[in-house]
Image (cartoon, rainbow, N blue to C red):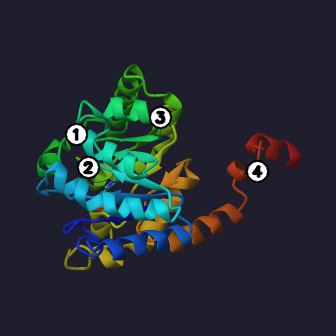
Amino acid sequence: MGVLNVTPDSFSDGGRYTDVDAAVQHGVDLFRQGAHVIDIGGESTRPGAQRVDAKTETDRVVPVIERLFAEGVPVSIDTTRAAVAEAALAAGAVVINDVSGGLADPDMAAVAAAARCPWVLMHWRGHSRDMQRLAEYTDVVAEVRDELRARADEAVAAGVDPGMIVLDPGLGFAKRAEHNWALSAHLDVLIDLGFPLLFGSSRKTYLGHLLAGPDGTPRPVGGREAATLATSVLAVASGAWGVRVHEVGATVDALAVWRATGSPRFRGTRDARDDRQERR
Ligand code: PMM
């Protein structure tokens, strides 16, 4: 999943693709580099961000989605608002990526159910403005698992086909660095819920802290790409179904390397058990 933020203020690409032509070109480029879907967001979710109204958000994304649809590029809409999702689907989007997991807007489930499209339910505890104060956990992996399960159960109860649900741990959303690392190390616990798992580490702040200079200054956004590749490959190797990244070409290359190592997941019906038997 390639990231395309058409916002003036997203943390890593804010302001670069507010012009429709530039946004469409970037979406096409990411698709040609190997992204299966381009995730378009019209509202920044960076910590502390101020909200924009639904009309502003819709006006930012719809012209870009229409043009990408015309170019044959599959698009997902990154929004927490049912009205924006509806307008995006009408413009040609084929996936709803809801960072609130359906919590922000009670009408989102009905939109997802009616559209019968994949719906990404990300783990979330509140809007950007106050999410860092919600980063309190006793056992982050178990709590995120239980909260994601509740989101999925509620979606199914609202009529969403379970086969259309994708879960996401929501790195950085009401999570400090130690929470992100714990979740990354235990993706299997979330995958055991039985849904495909999307993983989004790309350029996030916790990578900047990991790579801080000797004086403690976090590595700027532009220097987090190698760490993003490492976390993305590790996530896929742990069973993640997809990764949401800004640098698609490099990610595709890194995943080709992983695939060439002969991961059991890419050997059809064979699994580790078959391999062990063969070796005997
Ligand atoms: N992160 C951001 C925005 N949308 N959606 C999903 N499903 N998962 C994420 O981790 C996620 C998201 C924030 O980062 P951005 O500035 O790169 O969009």
CA gap between label 4 and label 2 equals 35 Å
The kind of secondary structure element at disc 4 is loop
Q: Secondary structure at mark 3?
A: loop
**Secondary structure at numbered mark 2:** loop
**Placement of the C terminus among the 4 image quadrants:** top right
Tell which circle, 4 or 3, labels the residue nearer the N-terminal end. 3
Residue 201 on image: x %, y %: 38, 59
Q: Quadrant of ligand 1?
A: bottom left
Callout 3 amino acid = Arg
Residue bearing mark 4: 267
Q: Label 3: which residue? A: 116
Image disc number at residue 173: 2
Q: Is residue 3 left or right of residue 256?
A: left
Residue at position x 38%, y 47% from top?
Answer: 90
Mark 2 touches mark 1? (CB < 8 Å): yes
N-terminal label among 3 and 1: 3
